[in-house]
Image (cartoon, grey):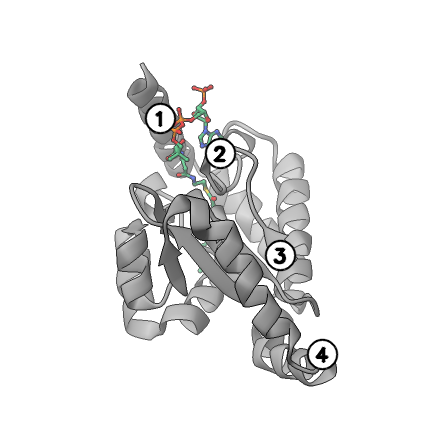
Amino acid sequence: MVLASAAPGIFSAGLDILEMYQSTPERCVAFWRALQDAWLNLYGSRLITMAAIEGHSPAGGCLLAMSCDYRVMAEGKFQIGLNETKLGIVAPFWFTDVMLNTIGHRETEKALQLGALYSAQQALSIGLVDKVVPLAEVMPTVEGELKNWLQIPAAARVITKTSMRKAVLDRLRSQKEKDAQFFADFINRDSVQKSLGMYIASLQKKKN
Ligand SMILES: CC/C=C\C/C=C\C/C=C\CCC/C=C/C(=O)SCCNC(=O)CCNC(=O)[C@H](O)C(C)(C)COP(=O)(O)OP(=O)(O)OC[C@H]1O[C@@H](n2cnc3c(N)ncnc32)[C@H](O)[C@@H]1OP(=O)(O)O
């Protein structure tokens, strides 16, 4: 399975910020449950999963990419990373776990505190992506890599993948409702809503 985007220049802009702003607790819980299930299915997929990152990939977009087995990113102006702290929010523990498994503890600690967004070359240097190529070569490179992965006996690959990812998946599975409730409480704090409001305004200002 290849994750790619139909929007030029954007792999994924992350979660819909407007869903987290001035929403109701009930809607926030439903929103979070949908995200949890999507991620559990993706990270726990038995399929070979690859991200064709042909554009920006902040926050939830970076989570999607990191949750794949292999990442190819376009060189150039695009950025990737977990930038949550820049919005005044905090990466949930399962976002953090996936990043830890991808780039290790020291880089994750720096990346998360700073809300760092990396260029493709920087992402390659810390192991956040596996390959950087010109934009037009992203999809052919993914397809070529996929052929390599498909050579591996499927049962052996799936057992290996499942055992590598089980602890992180189980950590969320065992506390889904608590996590959803925590998200709804956290996101509706006055201080968090204020930060999100300012971030949304800054996105709109950048455009004008
Ligand atoms: C131990 C744990 C303790 C506590 C944790 C508890 C709870 C956790 C709490 C919260 C966790 C939440 C996790 C959140 C994850 C996320 O994914 S948050 C989203 C982060 N995303 C971003 O910051 C991206 C913002 N967007 C951009 O930077 C740019 O838009 C872009 C680089 C992606 C693309 O740039 P451009 O091509 O220049 O496009 P525009 O900027 O003009 O955007 C077009 C249009 O789209 C709107 N938009 C962009 N991104 C979003 C978004 N994520 N959500 C909603 N809307 C978005 C943008 O405002 C423009 O709108 P219009 O002006 O056209 O209406």
Q: Which residue is mark 3?
A: 39
Q: Mark 4 against mark 2, which lies toward the viewer?
A: 4
Horizontal side of 70 relative to 202 (left or right) equals right
Q: Which residue is mark 1?
A: 203
Amino acid type at mark 2: Ile
Q: Looking at this view, is 6 or 142 the one in front?
A: 142
Amino acid type at mark 4: Ala
Q: For residue 130, which quarter of the picture?
A: bottom left
Closer to the chain start, of discs 2 and 1, is 2
Closer to the chain start, of discs 4 and 1, is 4
Residue 178 location in percent, x, y?
62, 58
Closer to the chain start, of discs 4 and 2, is 2
Horizontal side of 206 relative to 151 (left or right) equals left
Amino acid type at mark 1: Leu
Closer to the chain start, of discs 3 and 4, is 3
Q: For residue 125, which quarter of the picture?
A: bottom left
* Residue at 69% from the left image edge and 66% from the top image edge: 47
Q: Secondary structure at mark 1?
A: helix
Q: Mark 2 against mark 1, which lies toward the viewer?
A: 1
Amino acid type at mark 3: Trp
Label 4 near label 3: C-beta < 8 Å? Answer: no
- In 3D space, how far apart are the residues under numbered discs 3 and 4 (Cα atoms)? 22 Å
The disc at residue 154 is: 4
Horizontal side of 80 relative to 156 (left or right) equals left
Disc 1 crowd, CA 10 A, few/some/many (<14, 14-19, 20+)? few
Q: Mark 4 against mark 1, which lies toward the viewer?
A: 4
Q: Which residue is mark 2?
A: 17
